[in-house]
Image: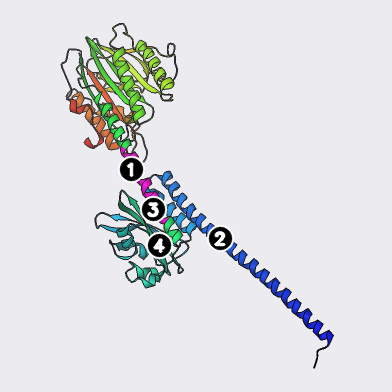
Amino acid sequence: MSVGGDAEARIEELERALQARAAEVARLMKLVDARSRELIAVKERSKRQAQLVGARTAIALLAQHGTLERAAPQMLEAFGNELGWQVVQLLMLDPATQTMRCRLQWTAGALTGVQALASQSNVRGVGLAGRVWTAAKPLWVSSITNMPSFVGRTHALAAGLHSACAFPVVVEGEVHAIIEMFATEVRELDEDLVFTLGTLGAQIGQWIEQARIQDQLRFNELQIARHIQTAILPRDLSVDGLEVAAMMVPATEVGGDYYDVLPFAGGAWFGIGDVTGHGVGAGMIMMMVQSAVAALTRDPSRQSPRAVIKDLNAFLFDNIRRRLREKDHVTFSLLRYTRDGWLRFAGAHEDLVIWRAATQRCERVRTSGVWLGAVIMLDELTQDAQLQLAPGDILVLYTDGLIEARDHARELFGLDRLCATIEELAHPSRSIAQLCDTVIGRAMQWCANQEDDISLVMARYHGEELDYEIASDQTVLSADDL
C-alpha cells in the first residue's frame, strides 16, 4: 500500500520541523552551558575576591591597631563576613599550661552553645588546633562528625557546626596563634582557600616579626636617649650659700625636661625648661639647650639672663626650624644667683615658687617672655627681673610634669597642692634633699599614670657659706624607686 503524496510531504515537513527544533534545543543547551560556566567563574572570582578582601583587611587592621590582640575583634569579624564562616576564634598560647586557648570568639547571628567551644584547651597534635600547631600548616575538616579527636566536637555539633578550618600564625619559626573558623553546613575541601589562608597566616606572622624588630629598635633608641638625658644632669650641687637638691623622674617615653646648676665663684646659674613633645627628638633638643647654656654662661661678659637667652634662642631657632625643620619649642627660665641672695631671671617657664621663712608661706613669681625656638628675635620680648632671698627662704623650680600629674579622676596635682605641700613640710630641721624627696613622693602617689617627666629643683638660702653636696644617686630616680 503506498502513501499518498500529501502524506509524504507532511512527514517530510514534520521531520524538518523536528530537526529545526533539535537544532534550537542544542543551541539553547550550549547557551545554558556557557551561562553556567560563566556563573561558576563569577562565583569563583567572587570567592577569590572575598578571600583577598579578608586577607587585605587583616593586614590593614594590624597596621591600624599595632598588635594581633588589638586587631583581633575586627579581624575575626572580617573573616566571618567576607569568607562566610559562622564562628571564628583566635587561639593563643597559655604559657602557664602550655596549651592553646581561645582568646576571642566572633559569631554570626544567634548561635547557641558556641561559648562552650571557646572554653576548650588544645594540646599539640590533638584535634584540629593541635594538629595545626604541630604541623604549622592550615587544616580543613569537611565533617566534624567524622573526626572523633576533634577537641570540643560535642559542643560544636550541639551548636550546629559541621565543617571547620584552621590556619597558624607563625612568628620566628614558632606558632604564635591559631585562627579557627566553623560553618553550619558541610563544606568540601577548598584548596584555593586553604592556600590563601596559609599565605595570610605567613603574612600576619611576618608583620608581627617586623613590628617586634621595630619596637626593639625604638626601645633601644629610647634607652640611649634616656641615658643621655639623665647622664648630663648635674651631679655636684655645691653652691656658696645654698643647700641644693634636685630630682628627675623620667616618664616611660623620653621627654624633654631640662634642669641645670652651673656654679661660679660667688654664685650659680640655674636653668629649668621643657621641650614640647616626647621621644628621641625632644631629648635631642634638650641636649642642645644644656650644651648651649653651659657654653654661654661660661662667658664672663654675659652677666644677664636676658643676654644668654637671646643668644640661646637664636641658636635653637636655627637648629630646630631651619636644620631639623621641626616646629618644637622650649619653655625655659634662666636664673643668676649671687652670694648676697639676689636672683636675676628671665624667660618663659612655670611660675617661680619662693617659700618665705618669715611668713612660712609660698610666694609665686610669674616668669615673662616667650618660648625659645619659636621666633627668631627676642630682644624686645625678654627682660630681666629680680628678687632677693632672705636667710631660710627656699627657691622651688619645677616642670609641668609635676603640677600636671593626674589622679584616677584626672584631677591635677596642681600648683596650689604643690605650695600647700611645701608649706606643710618646709622646716629648718628637714634637709632640702628630704624635702625634695617627699614632694616628689607625694606627686607620684597622686599620679595614676605618669604621662610626662617630673623634675624638681629646690635651694635653701643660708646667708653664709655652706659646703653641701647631695648624693649623686638622689639626683635622678625612676618611678619604680618611689
- What residue is disc 4 on? 165
> As displayed, is residue 194 above or below residue 226?
below
- What residue is disc 3 on? 201
How many residues crowd mark 2 within 10 Å: few (<14), some (14–19), many (20+)?
few
Cα distance, mark 4 to mark 2? 24 Å
- What residue is disc 2 on? 41
Taking the spot 40% from the left edge, 15% from the top edge, the residue there is 314
User: Which part of the image, by quadrant, shows the C terminus?
Assistant: top left
SS under mark 3: helix
Are the residues tagged 3 and 4 within 8 Å (C-beta)?
A: no
Which of 105/42 is in front? 42
> As displayed, is residue 326 above or below residue 116?
above
Q: Please state which of the two labelled residues, at mark 1 or mark 3, is closer to the viewer.
A: 3
Cα distance, mark 3 to mark 2? 26 Å
Q: Please state which of the two labelled residues, at mark 3 or mark 2, is closer to the viewer.
A: 2
- What residue is disc 1 on? 212
Which of 473/339 is in front? 473
Q: How is the image coloured?
A: rainbow
Taking the spot 45% from the left edge, 59% from the top edge, the residue there is 193
How many residues crowd mark 4 within 10 Å: few (<14), some (14–19), many (20+)?
many
- Residue 398 can be seen, yes or no: no
Q: Amino acid at mark 4?
A: Cys
Find residue 112 and report its horizontal and vertical position in percent: 42, 67
Magenta highlight range: 197-216
Q: Is residue 214 magenta?
A: yes
Find residue 405 and report its horizontal and vertical position in percent: 33, 34
The quadrant where residue 401 appears: top left
Are the residues tagged 4 and 1 within 8 Å (C-beta)?
A: no
Q: Amino acid at mark 3?
A: Gly
Q: Mark 4 or mark 3, which is nearer the start of the sequence?
A: 4
SS under mark 1: helix
